[in-house]
Amino acid sequence: DTEVTQTPKHLVMGMTNKKSLKCEQHMGHRAMYWYKQKAKKPPELMFVYSYEKLSINESVPSRFSPECPNSSLLNLHLHALQPEDSALYLCASSQVHSDNEQFFGPGTRLTVL
Amino acid sequence: AQKITQTQPGMFVQEKEAVTLDCTYDTSDPSYGLFWYKQPSSGEMIFLIYQGSYDQQNATEGRYSLNFQKARKSANLVISASQLGDSAMYFCAMREGNTGGFKTIFGAGTRLFVKA
């Protein structure tokens, strides 16, 4: 299984809602990532988990809260988002070495009203 | 400072011809990896090819090859025999060893249009 899955594919939420994005992989990768991608821009790294521990937080606002409950799952909890948070959220996983490619999921298209 | 530079916002190529997508990078870390990803309109990022900073030979994967010129800090992607399905956004990316290899920096991307 060389696939990263993400749910939901699309999400529309209001600024007062609480929602979660889910990412799953079964490739035995011990590094997992969240990226945010605005239209016509490259992905921007948000968080990195290594061996289920948060390794990198790129100064992301606290309204985004990541969670890695086990080595296969990565969640992104959303609360009190702003319209400018509307974007494609990509999850990725990789082996824990700089010479290994990241495998990306299909992304969740988030719209904040 | 911009670490990955892709100077071609858009490129056109005739089907069955070869095309080169440019990428230059900047790092002081002797250990780094260079990647190319393809992103179709569906949104998923697809890994194409990898080149390590210590690799002596240029990487090749099927129709994709990476023209690695270390002294010039360039890592251009060459796609041979273009197909209509190659139309997509292409991102050059770098991972530096001194970040533990976790932090990938992407260039701005080049949108490739393949004409029939």
Image (cartoon, coloured by chain):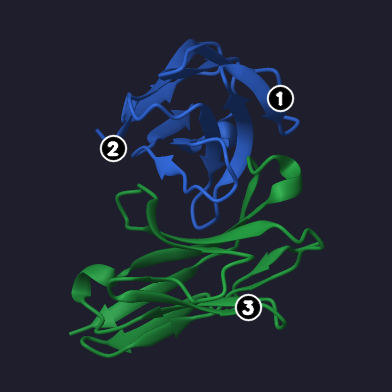
Chain colours: A blue, B green
Q: Position of residue B64 (x, y in %)?
A: 35, 73
Residue at image position (22%, 86%) is: B15
Which one is in front in this view, the residue at disc 3 or the one at disc 1?
3
Indicate the amino acid at tag 2.
Thr
> As drawn, is B82 to the left or to the right of A97?
left
Which of marks 1 and 2 precedes in the sequence?
A: 2
B56 or B87: nearer the eye?
B56
Q: Amino acid at mark 3?
A: Ser
Subunit ID for the residue under disc 3: B
Q: Residue at x 49, y 36 (%)?
A: A95
Specify whether B106 is left or right of A23: right
Q: Nearer the viewer, mark 2 or mark 1?
A: 2
Tag on residue A2?
2
For the residue pair A30 and B83, the one nearer the viewer reads as A30
- Percent x, y for residue A26? 33, 25
Position in image of residue B75 (x %, y %): 57, 75
Residue denoted by label 3: B74
3D distance between C-alphas at marks 2 and 3: 30 Å
Q: How many marks?
A: 3
Circle 2 packing at 10 Å, graded few (<14), some (14-19), many (20+), is: few
Residue identified by numbered label 1: A61
